[in-house]
Amino acid sequence: MTTPENAPENPLSPGSKELTVVHLMRHGEVDNPDGVLYGRLDGYHLSELGRQMADRVAEHLASRDVTHVVASPLERAQETATPIAKAHGLDLATDARLLEAENVFQGKTFGVGDGALRRPENWKHLVNPFKPSWGEPYVDQVVRMMGALDAAKDAARGHEAVLVSHQLPIWIVRSYVERRRLWHDPRKRQCTLASLTTFTYQGDRIVSVGYSEPAIDLVPAHLRAGAKPVQGKGKAFGA
């Protein structure tokens, strides 16, 4: 596996014609009425709308050649992946490398208008957005997510796999593959709830990255990619 500092210049694997597709899916909407940044906390399940999103993506993928379905250990990811695995008659696997990124603000509200950025006790965690200083380093996220992608590619070689994860790790690994800087404006992530970021491999190399939103009509406007955060809608920052 390559490291973030040594990405391959040519993603094409010469001589190999075998294609494998790995869909990296963000989970559906979570029941989070208090707008908590839930991170890796247990006990946060899909809302009814989130379950509808999961079912919609399962329908979207029903005709695809999916032979492997994996999810982060967190409830919202497991619940999103379950109807997809069921539609293909597969057991659902779990991979801890797909977990949400660590964040020191986990369990707190950290949204527009709540004053979090004005609290002195939080400033020490905000000094370095390039690492970032408030959570798991971006490079560490790349390493574990690339490992999960590679494992799924091997398990579904010649077919398709679905991995259910969380917004930030998905966006970071996509940014790495597409050779963008890892630090970024969170409001500009293209990774809407229940979206699919699709990596196509030829042999062992990624040759293309796609993005689709099969359940976009179910996603509230303030939670869509590029939407402006709305005061009182703290759960827009859930991942």
Image (cartoon, grey):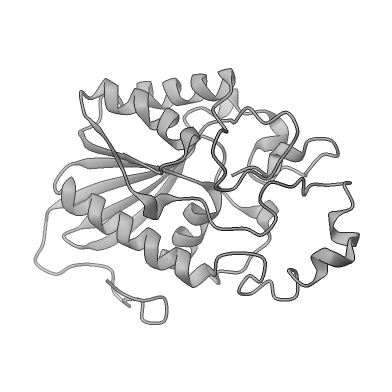
Across and down, in percent, residue 14 comes to: 14, 69
Across and down, in percent, residue 106 comes to: 66, 51
**Looking at the image, can residue 179 be seen?**
no
Query: Which residue extends farthest bottom?
Result: 5
Q: Is residue 203 above or below residue 158?
A: below
Judge left or right: residue 158 versus residue 137: left
For image coordinates 50% across by 21% down, the residue present is: 51
Q: Is residue 211 above or below residue 57?
A: below
Where is the C terminus found, in terms of image quarters?
top right
Q: Is residue 88 above or below residue 183?
A: above
For image coordinates 12% across by 53% down, the residue present is: 18
Q: Nearer the viewer, residue 90 or 191?
A: 90
Q: Quadrant of residue 132?
A: bottom right
Q: Quadrant of residue 82?
A: top left
Where is the N terminus found, in terms of image quarters?
bottom left
Q: Nearer the viewer, residue 213 or 173?
A: 173
Judge left or right: residue 128 versus residue 131: right
For image coordinates 57% across by 43% down, the residue present is: 41
Q: Nearer the viewer, residue 179 or 114?
A: 114
Across and down, in percent, residue 183 comes to: 61, 69
